[in-house]
Amino acid sequence: MMEHEDYYVLMMDALDGELADGRKSELEVHLRACPTCAREWQALLAIDTLFRQTPALAPAADFAQRTLARLPNRRYRVWLLGVMYALLLVGGALPMLLGYWVYSKWGTVLAEPTLWRTLWQGISQTVQVAGTILGALLNGAAGFVILHPSIVGWLLVLVGLVSLWGGMFRQLVIQPRRISSHA
């Protein structure tokens, strides 16, 4: 007994018109007995009919010339890819070579834990000083605003005026340019 895949091959041959009469009757008997293959056969017939009824589309007369003209020059593309690969190689190998050189030159110095401890202390002290300065600036600004609350009102009025005039500028200058460029 044949498998469903074998009957599927017979269906394809029948669609192509290459099925012998004896095999055609065998396929018909199987299609009456197997509802799954019968549904598949109906779907294949519908698709085949659709393809045969669809008109063939031909590309424009100068399609090949236009497409070839748009393709980049092969030598230029190969040269550009070579440069890109060289840059990627240098970008990947150069840091490794630099790291090896630094390690071979100053490896013993860099291996000292006191160096890293001192460096970390310097960075943390710098961050503390920056935090202190920023805190003092913010405290001074807050004290100024507390003493002169009208400053906040004036700042809000200025922000409102700038946004108002920005909107007016867009409506009066930029929008007419778009309209005139479309005309």
Image (tube, grey):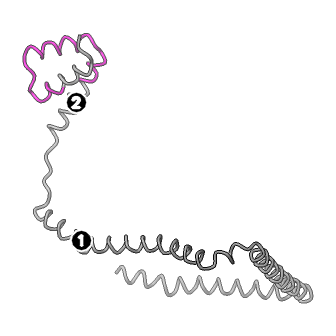
> Which region shows up in magenta?
12-41
Name the quadrant of the N terminus. Answer: top left
Residue designated by label 2: 46
Q: Is residue 126 left or right of residue 139?
A: left
Where does residue 9 sit, x and y in percent of width and height? 20, 24
In the rendered structure, which disc, 2 or 1, sits on the residue that comes first in sequence? Answer: 2
- The picture quadrant where one finds residue 161 is bottom right
Residue designated by label 1: 72
Q: Residue at (60%, 74%) from the top-left corner?
A: 103
Where does residue 20 sit, x and y in percent of width and height? 7, 19
Q: Nearer the viewer, residue 116 or 161?
A: 116
Amino acid type shown at disc 2: Ala
Q: Main secondary structure of the magenta part?
A: helix
Which callout, 2 or 1, points to the residue nearer the camera? 1
- The picture quadrant where one finds residue 177 is bottom left
Q: Nearer the viewer, residue 70 or 183?
A: 70
Is residue 53 highlighted in magenta? no
Q: CA distance from mark 2 to mark 1?
A: 43 Å
Q: Residue at (63%, 79%) from the top-left corner?
A: 106
Q: Nearer the viewer, residue 20 or 59?
A: 20
Where does residue 155 sit, x and y in percent of width and height? 77, 86
Amino acid type shown at disc 1: Pro
Q: Is residue 62 left or right of residue 50?
A: left
